[in-house]
Image (cartoon, helix red, strand yellow):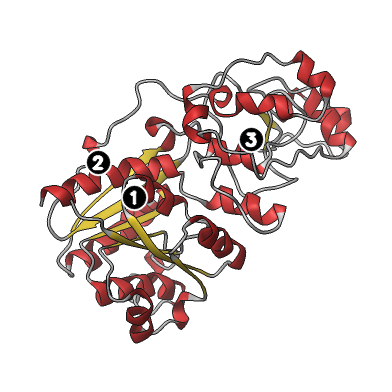
Amino acid sequence: MSKYNVLDLFCGCGGLSKGFEMAGFNIIGGVDFNKEAIDTFNFNFKGSKGIHTDILNIDEEKIKEIFENKVDIIIGGPPCQGFSSANRNKVDDDPRNKLFFQFVKFVDVFKPKVVVIENVRGIVTENNGYAKKEIYKIFEKRGYKVTHKILDASDYGVPQKRMRNFFVMSKDFIFDFEKINKVSKKVTVKDAIGDLYKLEKNEKEIKNANFEDMSSYAKKMNKKSDIYNHEVRYPAEIVQKRVSYVKQGENWQSIPKELFSNQRNNRHSSAYKRLNEKDVSVTIDTGNSHSNYFHPLYNRIPTVREAARIQSFPDNFIFCGSRTSQYRQVGNAVPPLLANSIAKLIKEDLDNE
């Protein structure tokens, strides 16, 4: 069986790449405009070439030279904001689509066996699915068989409800999303981070917590690794006081009104949301101190490592850069286990060809 080379465009810290690596693919490189994300990518994918640049600045010859013209699969999440109904006659010319068509240029240069695009689920429905239709047209014109599906990460072993759309384009087979294996039982927040409770600095809260052995999920994430990116910080006293009124699964509506300086009844349902140990997490966002989700037991937001566990990053995946950047990298990433579910089936299809 072949070891297929993967290039990740708009790679961020490498969540999509990690999923493909776990499935046995060879990650040869990534490109992203965010330097700290690329620092993380290069730290975790040894021997890979993570390039910090504006993708628009790389010409075709440079692309071939850097990656030695040996790319079997291209993956990534190119922005598609310019595919709107107002621009139906000039999709190619819309400046907001330059990044997307640069992604397509990489496809034209390497002519990979498979292309995977990840994006927000709205791309399928907005403007009567115009963006979806254009993407089908662009890749079918190049000889690819295109399929797509909106997937919920919690169906594939990620302890988080996260809806994302995936396009899979292949030269030689039609990818069937229905063949991806789903988990029989969803992974909960406690499964994901329960073993980390004992690392809390507040001894009083530690004594009140119910510690159990690591879950099978935690063992899969840890594999006897040290714990990194787990700096415990508590927010301002007023925030801690507000959150103290919120029980697991509840939100800002449980907080006494007098604790808010401005009276509002239109806060988002995720505001001051406390995670429920017995359920999957809400979608992990890119926030830091202003984040909308709080630890199930403690009056703080999850640490970077706890957020990474909920995103299904293994503990030996180290995040570089500032704390704010680390949160952003985690929140922007494709959950590796979700990517892995897609990658494993792609590998089966490729090996069968």
Please name the residue shown 32% across and 30% down the image. 182
- Going by the numbered disc 3, the residue's amino acid type is Ser
Q: Which residue is mark 2?
A: 177
**Tag nearer the camera, 2 or 3:** 2
Q: Nearer the viewer, residue 7 or 104?
A: 7
Please name the residue shown 81% across and 37% down the image. 234
In percent of width and height, residue 284 lies at 57, 41
Q: Indicate which disc residue 21 carries.
A: none
How crowded pointer 2 is (Cα within 10 Å; few <14, some 14-19, many 20+) is rated as some
Q: Are marks 1 and 2 in contact (CB under 8 Å)?
A: yes
Q: Is residue 121 left or right of residue 148?
A: right
Counting residues from the N terminus, which is met first, the one under dot 1 or under dot 2? 1
Q: Nearer the viewer, residue 2 or 85?
A: 2
Q: Which residue is mark 3?
A: 270
Q: Determine the CA span between mark 1 and mark 2.
A: 9 Å
Secondary structure at numbered mark 2: helix
| Residue 202 in sight from this viewpoint | yes
Q: Residue furthest front?
A: 224
- Going by the numbered disc 1, the residue's amino acid type is Phe
Q: Which residue is mark 1?
A: 166
Q: Determine the CA span between mark 3 and mark 1.
A: 25 Å
In percent of width and height, residue 259 lies at 87, 31
Residue 130 against residue 184 in the figure, above or below: below
- Going by the numbered disc 2, the residue's amino acid type is Phe
How crowded pointer 1 is (Cα within 10 Å; few <14, some 14-19, many 20+) is rated as many
Q: Where on the picture, by quarter, is residue 105?
A: bottom left
In percent of width and height, residue 316 lies at 54, 44
Q: Where on the picture, by quarter, is residue 116?
A: bottom left
Q: Where on the picture, by quarter, is residue 275?
A: top right
